[in-house]
Amino acid sequence: MLTIENILCNRGGKVLFQNLGFTVGDACILVIRGENGSGKTTLLEAVAGLRKVDEGKILYANKNVLGEHYQEYCDIIQYVGHRQAIKQQLSVTENVKFWAEHKGNLAAVPAAISFFGLEGYESALCGKLSAGYKKRVALSRLMVTNSEIWLLDEPFVNLDAVGSEAIANLIATRVERGGSVIITAHGDVPFKKYAEIDLRDFK
């Protein structure tokens, strides 16, 4: 279980949010909302352990994720942010294999490429792909890492209808199997059941 306890984050001397707390259990989707610049990405980075909070704690299984248990925590989360962490000089297949090798799951590479409609692009350099296809490559790591908690920063941005449906189905399947997913979003999300937090409530 992931627990956020009374966290506060500043950026450039401005309080983005404070006294923010929530718990994410198994088989749960949490949607983080807020205006541009409200701190949605900052919050997700903090939960991913990529940014320190100014106050409060982030706990997984009652252990502080930024302490001695950080590596243990990293092994069970997968973060896909706006920067995507794609190696532009490598091909689609090489990028997906890189993530799969990290988790010892090379057998899942063909399925991930097929699921995200990347067939025919396997040898294409990622630096030459459109924004939408780069997003598909970034999201494909979810299928080859099989992490318990997914942290997705606006996963539907830059995707067409087919790509959006694919990631929505993947998220729904992950939750059905007991996983936890936290996403940031502006508009509607294609899920029937989810929890929601608006950062405007924590100024």
Image (cartoon, rainbow, N blue to C red):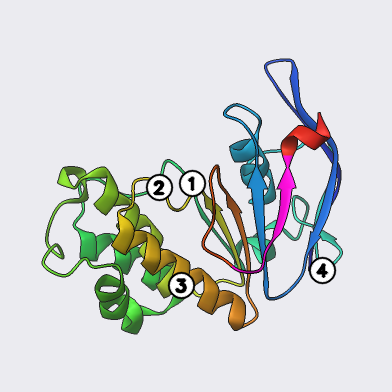
Q: Of circles 4 and 1, which is in front?
A: 1
Return the mark for residue 101.
Answer: none
On the image, numbered disc 2 is attached to which residue? 84
Q: Are marks 2 and 1 in contact (CB under 8 Å)?
A: yes
Name the residue type under label 1.
Answer: Gly
Dot 3 falls on a residue whose secondary structure is helix
Question: Can residue 195 be found in the magenta stretch?
Answer: yes
Q: Residue at x 62, y 43 (%)?
A: 45
Mark 1 and mark 3 residues within 8 Å of each other at the beta carbon: no
In contact (CB < 8 Å): disc 4 and disc 2: no
Q: Earlier in the sequence, mark 4 or mark 2?
A: 4
The residue to which callout 4 is attached is 61
Residue 35 falls left or right of residue 92: right
Q: In the figure, 191 relative to 175: above or below? A: above
Task: Using the image, tell me which numbered label, if any, was put on residue 170.
Answer: 3
Kindly check if marks 4 and 1 are in contact, taking CB atoms under 8 A apart as contact: no
